[in-house]
Amino acid sequence: MKTLYIVRHAKSSWEYEGIADIDRPLKERGIKDAHLISNYLAETINKPDVFVTSSANRALHTAIIFCDNFGYPLSNLYIKKHLYNFSDGYLVKTIKALDDSFNSAIIFSHDHGINTFVNKYGGKPIAHVPTCGVIGIEFDNEHWKSIKKGKTTLIEFPKNHK
């Protein structure tokens, strides 16, 4: 059994002129939501074996907050530049390349790739994963590279905790 948690980065800011998209920071609301959701999850799920994030500032900052609240060492956080791509292709490649010694993983990524992935690989249709939304999917597989359709076991959005 493999368990995957997909996290869409928390709410980011568009207020800085001339800043590259990859460098956009989190808004104050995003920081609060990341703490809200990660604190809730840290009390309700087992700590994932591995944390993997896009290199985009907003995803990385979200991952750092989750690491802190889960007690996961930042030195073990995997940063994957190709997860900044907004298709599900790189997300799928990242997941299927996970080491089989990890039975659970949490991945921080972006809008379009996440929505496509959770609807293709999960067991429940989800119209839209909002910022800092988390979807959990269990796969009845021994190897990450063999995952197919799984069972959606968790759907958590910040608005449900306010």
Image (spheres, grey):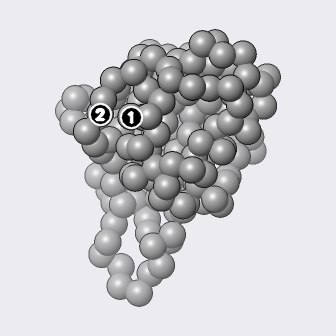
- Distance, label 1 to label 2, CA atoms, is 6 Å
Depth check: 5 or 89 in front? Answer: 89
Q: Is residue 82 above or below residue 134?
A: below
| Residue 123 x, y percent position in the rendering | 39, 21
Q: Are marks 1 and 2 in contact (CB under 8 Å)?
A: yes
| Residue 84 x, y percent position in the rendering | 55, 60
Quadrant where the C terminus is found in the figure: top left
Q: How many badges with numbers are in the image?
A: 2
Mark 1 or mark 2: whose residue is earlier in sequence: 1
| Residue 10 x, y percent position in the rendering | 38, 50
Q: Is residue 136 above or below residue 1?
A: below
Q: Quadrant of residue 155?
A: top left
Residue that numbered label 1 is attached to: 119
Question: Which mark identifies residue 144?
Answer: none
Q: Which residue shows up at 36% across the image and 60% down it? A: 12
Element carrying mark 2? loop
Which kind of residue does numbered mark 1 sit on?
Answer: Asn
Q: Which residue shows up at 75% across the image and 44% down it? A: 75
Element carrying mark 1? helix
Question: Which mark identifies residue 126?
Answer: 2
